[in-house]
Image: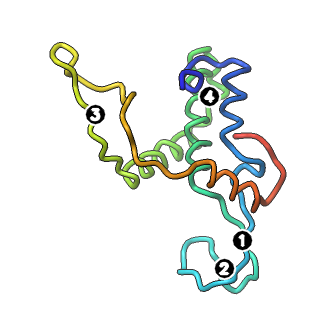
Amino acid sequence: EPIFGGPLTNESEHAWTKLIPMGKGFVHINNESELDPVPGLDTSLPHQRAMVAVFHQLHCLYITRQSYFAARAGNLDDLRPEHLSHCWDYLRQTIMCAGDTTLEWLGPPPRDVGSTGWGYQHQCKDYAAIYGWAEKNRLTDTKKIH
């Protein structure tokens, strides 16, 4: 949707904020089953706190967007290089992990140098279901993207 790629406006900020459920994607999970050991997981506790990755990914994309517009406006003090470096690598890993193999056809020359990516059917997860689950299991009532 164009609003997500357009300039910073009240409408675009509202659209980005609506992508993130209440609680910012941080959730509370009961330890009711045996979980494989992963970083940050303490299976001796009755409850766990976690962040749903898709909302971390959207946060990183949003921070990159905000930083782009801050840099264009000359507001270099608004940039957080360490956070941006983390986000770029995290998004790189996410894209490589998801590995969308949809074929995006090239037009005839001279339009054969790339693809817009629009108009292709992709295999998607049910974002509304993920959003609803995260909001139902939220850790806090915070409602923002950053």
Where residue 125 appears, as percent x and y from the top left, is 50, 52
- The way the protein has been coloured in the rendering is rainbow
Quadrant where the image shows the C terminus: top right
Mark 4, residue position: 66
Q: Are dots 2 and 4 in contact, CB under 8 Å?
A: no
Which circle's residue, 2 or 1, is located before the other in the chain? Answer: 1
Q: Position of residue 114 (x, y in %)?
A: 26, 25
Q: Which residue is mark 2?
A: 42
Left or right of 141? Residue 9 is: left
Q: Are marks 2 and 3 in contact (CB under 8 Å)?
A: no
In primary-sequence order, the first of circles 1 and 4 is 1
Task: Calculate the distance from the C-alpha at mark 2 to the C-alpha at mark 3.
Answer: 43 Å
- Mark 1 vs mark 4: give the one in front: 1
**Mark closer to the observer (2, 3):** 3
Task: Look at mark 3 in the image and give the residue it sits on.
Answer: 104
Q: Amino acid at mark 2?
A: Asp
Q: Quadrant of residue 42?
A: bottom right
Label 4 crowd bin: few (<14), some (14–19), many (20+), radius 10 Å: some
Assess disc 1: are there few (<14), some (14-19) or many (≥20) residues with their C-alpha within 10 Å of its C-alpha: some
Disc 2: CA contacts within 10 A as few (<14), some (14-19) or many (>=20) = some
Label 1 sits on residue: 29
The label nearer to you, 2 versus 1, is: 1
Report the residue that reaches farthest toward the left: 109
**Mark 3 neighbour density, 10 Å: few (under 14) some (14–19) many (20 or more):** some
Label 1 SS: strand
